Amino acid sequence: MIVPRLPDTRAAAAPTAPAVADDALALDNRRFAEAVGHAAGRLRDAGVGPGDVVGLLLPNRVELLIAVFAAWRLSAAVTPVNPALAPPEVAFQTSDAGVGVVVVEPGASVDLPGVTLIECSDLLASTTHADAVDVQPTQVALLIYTAGTTGTPKGVMITHGNIDAMTSTFVDHFAFTADDHSLLVLPLFHANGVVLGTLSPLRAGGQATIVGRFNAESFFPAVEKHRPTYFSAVPAIYAMLTALPDDVVPDTSSLRFGICGAAPMPADLIGRFEDRYGVPIVEGYGLSETTTASAINPVHGLRKPGTVGPPLPGQRIRIVDAELQDVPAGATGEVLIAGEVVMAGYLNRPEATADTVVDGWLRTGDVGRFDGDGCLQLVDRVKDMIIRGGENLYPKEIENQIYRHADVFEAAVVGRPHDVLGEVPIAYVSFRSGTRTTTDDVAASLREELAKVKQPVEIIELDDIPKNPVGKIDKPALRRLDSDNRR
């Protein structure tokens, strides 16, 4: 496999060429390979071996990338953990993934009984060294956790073969070379940040620079300082950048393009960004379950704002009806995807895997259609997922936490449109008769159990939550109610 051995192959080919950097550390290929070898030795001494899973509870920083390659050097997998998760959420992911070792920030206070914690600074300080172990295409490389309609996060098993196919496609599609330089603003606990933002430019001989948590005011100064050739972002980031004061006139001449994914981006927003900054935006579409992307507009050629472009080479996309039969050309239906990038399945969840991957086709739960030029247009979502600033939020997961409050009778979470973030979650609750519990009490309990991004921006009490004719909670009615109340 090509990707797991990139540090060694790059060091042999161009030892002094830049590899990875952040605000505190910059490594050329030789130093990057040495750091990976020593970090692998530290993980090995902690008991990590083939088939194990290493947890990475870190913000975006170079040490996270070193840990990824160090684990792969030992034929182990990694599961990046969102550092903003609440302690119960961190405990669930690490336990579900069978993690025995977690890499954390220096001085971090993390309570994970039975798990060995290694500070990321210890990886760099290690004096031991581990030789590389062979990996196979079918071995799991990444476990990316994503919630589902049940509200229970699931580990998406991305194999080395998946990553090899996806990075090869990206290198070809974007014509990446050793001159390309990624400015990484998306989190490394998402497949996009790992695969498109880091592994793909490294595979092409290029480099990646991490700028940490996104800030609109500091983004273009970082572009002018580092001179990247591309970056990948979500619609909320582009919205914030277009909202900068008119006197912000940055030098964007190094940028070949920007990539937008995670949520549909309005065509007028694409136009505003391109007109103001002179950087073309290519919109794409994919899921963690397809190792990042399945359709992307080209940088050169027919680029259609409002669509996510044609299927990428090596992937097939079908539009089907409820019986999974192909619909007529131009008709709307569920988007199905097949190809070498489709995940191996959900960890320890054979039933969920069987429901999602049918005869080799991944059921995305998204609704779309192909236009006359063969470009995919996303219409809606079968699932009730809320996309907040590029983060996928699943109402059922939030509802499950609300229902843990004994005085809650019914609860429903829906998305509210937001000019910058796209959507934000709001919750409707009804309480059991006679209780003195308030919506403030519910909000306080959620702050202890859910990451901030998942917490509803408003919790609204209703005497009775509306139902449809078969007795199910009527979420369309709740969305209409919210819209009416905000007029």
Image: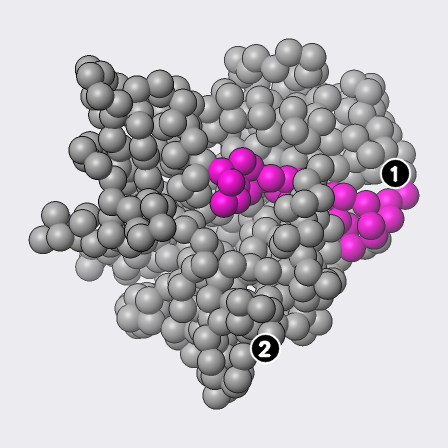
In the foreground, 216 or 114: 114
* Image spot of residue 198 (x, y percent): 62, 50
Question: What residue occupies the far front of the structure in this picture?
Answer: 470
Question: What residue occupies the far bottom of the structure in this picture?
Answer: 372
Q: Which residue is mark 2?
A: 326
Q: Is residue 139 magenta?
A: yes
* Image spot of residue 26 (x, y percent): 60, 39
Residue 373 seen by the camera:
yes
* Image spot of residue 375 (x, y percent): 50, 79
Q: Tell me whether the residue at label 2 lies in contact with that at label 1, contact meaning CB atoms closer than 8 angstroms.
A: no
Please name the residue shown 57% across and 32% down the image: 81
- Against 357, residue 461 (above or below) is above
In the foreground, 364 or 159: 364
Relative placement, left or right, of 214 versus 168 is: left
Q: Is residue 421 magenta?
A: no
In this view, the mark in front (2 or 1): 2
- The kind of residue on which mark 2 rests is Asp
- The kind of residue on which mark 1 rests is Ala
Dot 2 surroundings within 10 Å: few (below 14), some, or many (20 or more)?
some
SS for callout 1: loop
Q: Which residue is mark 1?
A: 132
In the foreground, 404 or 440: 404
SS for callout 2: loop
Please name the residue shown 53% across and 13% down the image: 109
**Highlighted range, magenta:** 134-161
Relative placement, left or right, of 471 versus 127 is: left
In the foreground, 23 or 276: 276
